[in-house]
Amino acid sequence: MLTGTAVLLRARLESDVATLHAGLYEDVASRSRSDARPWRPIPPGPSSPFRVREDDDRSAEAFSVIELATGELAGAAVLWAIDTHNRLGHAGLSLLPAFRGRGLGRDVLRVLCHYGFTIRGLHRMQLETLADNEAMIGAALACGFRHEGTLRSNAWVSGQFLDEVIYGLIDDEWKAG
C-alpha cells in the first residue's frame, strides 16, 4: 500500500468493482470526459473497466483510492502505458462524486508520482486531460507537471470536439520539487 497525506492507494479488490463501476462508469457524462473510448452499457463484473485483472499486464498498474480520514473507497488511480525501455508512464485518476472537491486528487497524483519515480524507476510521467478540467490541471501543476502541449479538437465528448492538454514531469523535477 502507498500512503499520502489524505489517501492510500492499494490493490484493487473484487469488492471495489461494483462501487467503482456504479460511481465512475455508469455516470455517462463524467465517463465520457475521462475516457477516449465511447461509453456503452456494460454490466459490472468481467466486462467492467474496473475489474480485477489476473493477467500479467506489466503495462498498467491499477489502484483503488482510499480516503484516510474515513477509510472509504474514494476512487481509482492508474499508472498506464508503462514503457520500461524509455522509462515512462501515464498517470490517471477518477474520484467518486462524493469525494471530489476535497483536494484528494492532488494527493493521489503525488502518490502516483512517488510510485512511478521511486518504486518503478520511471524517468518521465505524463498525463492527458480535457483543457477545461481545472481540477486535474490544478493537481498536475501542484505536483510540478508542466504544460507541454494542446491537442486542438482532439476529444469527442457528448456531441462536440474538445481540446486536450498534455502535462509532463521528469524525475529530476520531481526530486527537486
Image (cartoon, rainbow, N blue to C red):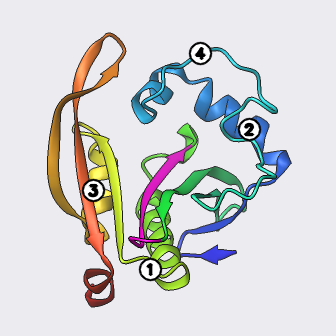
Q: Quadrant of residue 164?
A: top left
Q: CA distance from mark 4 to mark 3?
A: 30 Å
Specify which label sits upstream in the sequence, 3 or 1: 1
Residue at image coords 46%, 33% = 35
Q: CA distance from mark 2 to mark 3?
A: 26 Å
How would you rate the neighbour count of disc 3 (Cα within 10 Å): few for under 14, some for 14-19, many for 20 or more? some
Q: Mark 4–mark 3 contact, CB under 8 Å?
A: no
On the image, the x and y values in percent for residue 85 come to 44, 71
- Residue type pointed to by label 1: Phe
Residue marked by disc 1: 117
On the image, the x and y values in percent for residue 73 come to 69, 52
> In the structure shown, which secondary structural element does the residue marked by tag 2 occupy?
helix
Q: CA distance from mark 4 to mark 1?
A: 35 Å
Image quarter (top left, top right, bottom left or bottom right) of the N terminus: bottom right
Residue marked by disc 2: 19
The stretch in magenta equals: 85-95
Q: Residue furthest bottom?
A: 176
Residue at image coords 57%, 58% = 59
Q: Which mark is residue 40?
A: 4
How would you rate the neighbour count of disc 1 (Cα within 10 Å): few for under 14, some for 14-19, many for 20 or more? many
Q: CA distance from mark 2 to mark 1?
A: 30 Å
Q: Quadrant of residue 169?
A: bottom left
Q: Is residue 42 above or below residue 92?
A: above
Specify which label sits upstream in the sequence, 4 or 1: 4
On the image, the x and y values in percent for residue 79 come to 52, 60
Q: Mark 4–mark 1 contact, CB under 8 Å?
A: no
How would you rate the neighbour count of disc 2 (Cα within 10 Å): few for under 14, some for 14-19, many for 20 or more? some
Residue marked by disc 3: 138
- Residue type pointed to by label 2: Thr
- Residue type pointed to by label 3: Gly
Question: Closest to the observer: 29 or 152?
Answer: 152
